[in-house]
Amino acid sequence: MKKFIVTTTINPPTKAFLKFAEMQDWTMIVVGDLKTPHSDFENKDWIYLSPSYQEENFPELSEAIGWNCIMRRNFGFIEAYKRGADVVASVDDDNIPYDEWGKDLIVGEEVTVPIYDCITGVLDPMKLTNHKELWHRGYPIDRLYESKYVEYVGERRRKVLIQASLWDGDPDVDALCRLTYAPKGLELTIEKSFSSNNYIPFNSQNTFIAREVLPCFMMLPHIGRCDDIWGGYLAQFMFDTRPVFTKATVYQERNEQSVLKNLEDELFGYKNTSSFLNSLVNRDAYLPKETFHAYKLYCQEYDK
């Protein structure tokens, strides 16, 4: 099995990054941006995609996405796909992996997992943790009050195409949740791995994606902090799959960010996520379609 780790960074190699780079049986791909200290990443024991490499090899997509944004990570996904990846782990450079990271990998396997559904039609994975007061970034805010009504519907056998592993420390919640509860230094626990028949928001910070799903998953530009969440919803719709959530295997020491800037960048999602989910068949009304189509075309090219 060919396994790749993909990340983006504008920082010198962090503690988290260096631990990921040491992972046995994994190949690291680092996607550079204009602000990345390139000399810190070139000619090392990993694959570095410089801005010039991205421009030369993916010109249409590069122009469509723009610079100085986390969505440059898409070039790492395509590069991994090009190199024959069976599974790609998308990680952030402020998520320090535990020693057991990657050892519970179930992507590509058939597993029996408990299934939980919510009356809203969207399951908030935080409601299955020990911190039910929180909600996952990208959960439709207008359905938040009813998100607590979760029902166990039995165990089901599922082929795992997306594995969303959780995160201790500073959990991935939206700005409203962060302003309300100021979660920090938490330990998230779950009784066991789980999935749903509903859509489930998942992110790109500690997530494992099967090769066959990659052409239908990207971090979408120009929609604020919906980028990975809406990309995840879109992949679930297009591939008729749902992620399996597993225990925390990283500790996030969150890079310095402005929560008020995060709030501004999340307004688009607060206003549109519910209607987007209700009309995924007409997704081009919400998405920069030329970007998604360019991404798919590059993947199709490497399938020939």
Image (cartoon, grey):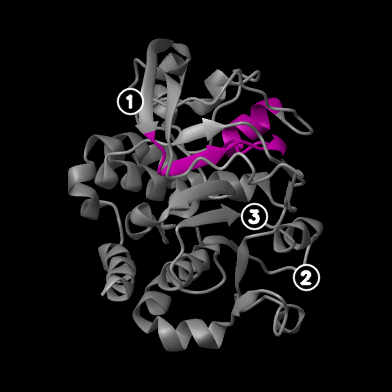
Asked if the residues shown at circle 2 and circle 1 are in contact, with their CB atoms under 8 angstroms apart, the answer is no
Classify residue 36 by image quadrant.
bottom right
Camera-side mark, 3 or 1? 1
Residue under label 2, please give it. 12
**Does 19 sit left or right of 101 as displayed?**
right
Q: Is the residue marked by circle 3 packed among few (<14), some (14-19), or many (20+) residues within 10 Å?
A: many
Three-letter code for the amino acid on which mark 3 is drawn: Asp
Does the magenta-highlighted stretch encompass residue 237?
A: no
**Does 193 sit left or right of 61 as displayed?**
right
Query: In the image, what residue occupies the spot 32% across and 38% down?
Result: 241
Q: Position of residue 139 (x, y in %)?
A: 45, 32
For residue 197, the mark is 1
Three-letter code for the amino acid on which mark 2 is drawn: Pro
Query: In the image, what residue occupies the spot 68% across and 69% down?
Result: 10
Q: Is the residue marked by circle 1 packed among few (<14), some (14-19), or many (20+) residues within 10 Å?
A: some
Residue under label 3, please give it. 92
- Relative height, residue 270 to residue 73 (above, below): above
Q: CA distance from mark 3 to mark 2?
A: 13 Å
Q: CA distance from mark 3 to mark 1?
A: 28 Å
Secondary-structure class at tag 2: loop
Query: In the image, what residue occupies the spot 74% across and 68% down?
Result: 11
Which sits in the foreground, 285 or 303? Answer: 303
For the C terminus, the quadrant is: bottom left
**Does 208 sit left or right of 17 as displayed?**
left
Which sits in the foreground, 96 or 23? Answer: 23
Q: Earlier in the sequence, mark 2 or mark 1?
A: 2
